[in-house]
Image: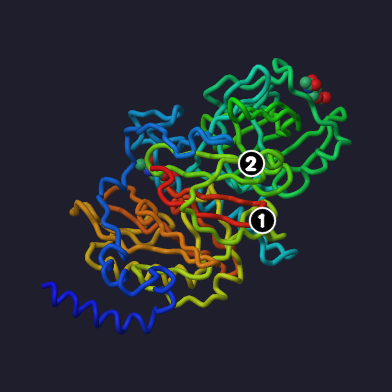
Amino acid sequence: MAVCQNSIFHIFFLFSSLLFFSYLNKAYGTEGTFASNIPHTYHHAIEIQSLLPTTTCSEFSSRHRGKKGAVLPMFNKNGPCSPLSNKDNIQKTINHTQILIQDQSRVHSIHSRISKKGVSITPEEVRLPANSGSSLGTGNFFVTVGFGTPKKDLPVIFDTGSDLTWIQCQPCVGGCYPQRDPIFDPIKSSSYSNISCSSIDCSQLRSGTGGSPSCSSSTCVYSIQYGDQSYSIGFFGQETLTLSPTDAFPKFKFGCGQNNDGLFGKVAGLLGLGRDKISIVSQTALKYKKLFSYCIPAHSSGFLALGAPPSTAAKFTPLLADSRGPSFYFLNLQGISVGGKNLAISPSAFSVGGTIIDSGTVVTRLPPSAYSAVRTAFRQAMTTYPSAPALSILDTCYDLSGFKTVSIPKILLHFAGGTDLDIPPTGLLFAQSTSQACLPFAGNSDAGDVAIIGNKQQQTVEIIFDVAGGKLGFGPGGCS
Ligand SMILES: *[C@@H]1O[C@H](CO)[C@@H](O)[C@H](O)[C@H]1NC(C)=O
Ligand SMILES: *[C@@H]1O[C@H](CO)[C@@H](O)[C@H](O)[C@H]1NC(C)=O
């Protein structure tokens, strides 16, 4: 048996080494480790049950605890650890079709914000509000931060795709959607003040996704609309933002929204982690040096860390800026492997539209030719399993109800600098139920649209944004 296996490996290696020499060299270093690791290196053995939403919460724990900077626990709004979710009803409250429809709306608005076409606008794009931000989607995750004096702790959606931070404020003259906590009242805070129309801060709203400024009795008014018709309008003010017992930021600029509606659920507002001027990343730059990391949980809780030293095991790739979308974090995606095989995708397929990493998009979107290559390779590796009907935009689905464990080909995204994102098992299947588990990738309809690394593929990995250092890192095993 051992002899037989060895010779098979030997023959296989002779062929594959010619074809994939450079890739293997990069990924595994030596021939020896390659040959001895075949079964484990190219596939994940996944227990079917681990694909479904869990109903039990395991405690927040992070290796960042006790180090410097602010570390905020992060939860999925509908997850088992969320103080906002109905724990007895988790399976029922998650409608996967709904998630995918709203995800497509977010992707559509990102594509129209980062238009390769520049000035030309298609009729479809005209329908979106002029200052549209991202659609929020439903795969949203939140952290809790403190506003005002005395401090009020409020849950806010965290979003790397927009810059302005805002919360609902009293008086809700134009209406507020229902939230779990009492609505923030700036009059009851001794540290709140309005920002005047003539200030430079007001004019900075104009850039990126800050929302367009206007004036009311010489007070700066912001207005931000999201692609899915969600919006927030109110006074642009400044207030003390507290992120940890030691880290408070006086005069933090934010939107105090008196007219809000949309898909925000029970959270109080949104935390904008984009890379443009008024984002929290820019406003806390003196203290945190534009260094932050997060881990989006697959099952229980994750974290958002600002200014804390990242995992030492992380591998980095250059973080790029692009004037087509100043709020977004661009990366240089260069290739993809499925089941150990580096796919034949033209490098220009990736360079035409570019690639961003986004916390709010659920399913990774690839250029059409790249998605097609991934799908073909994935299907070839999954022929053992009966197929299932498509789920909304996901066209590669399997009925795994007859299995306890399944063997799924690994998918690696190859970035510039020789850095790979080895997608964790939870990012390889999106399961409505065990009888309909789908490959959670989709193709863009236009080859010129930006590719988006979605949060499904980021789950459990520590994603490190070293904006000042111009690099983005992937640290394994950040959370569960
Ligand atoms: C989920 O949402 C879709 C689209 O809105 C709807 O057609 C479907 O009936 C919903 N499914 C459930 C189980 O509520
Ligand atoms: C902010 O400005 C508005 C409009 O001028 C005003 O109604 C409100 O009282 C001001 N708030 C504070 C705290 O000054």
Residue under the image location 72 percent in, 27 percent down? 239
Which amino acid type corresponds to the residue marked 2 in the rendered image? Gly
Tell me the element at label 1: helix
Residue under the image location 52 percent in, 33 percent down? 265
Return the residue nearer the eye: 238 or 102. 238
Which amino acid type corresponds to the residue marked 1 in the rendered image? Arg
Which residue matches tag 2? 272
Residue under the image location 41 percent in, 43 percent down? 479
Near mark 1 (Cα within 10 A), the count class, few <14, some 14-19 or many ≥20, is many
Q: Position of residue 330 (x, y in %)?
A: 61, 59
Q: How many marks?
A: 2
Q: Nearer the viewer, mark 1 or mark 2?
A: 2
The numbered disc on residue 113 is 1
Which quarter shows the N terminus?
A: bottom left
Does the rendering let one see residue 129?
A: no
1 sits left or right of 467 in the view: left
To which quarter of the image does residue 229 belong?
Answer: top right
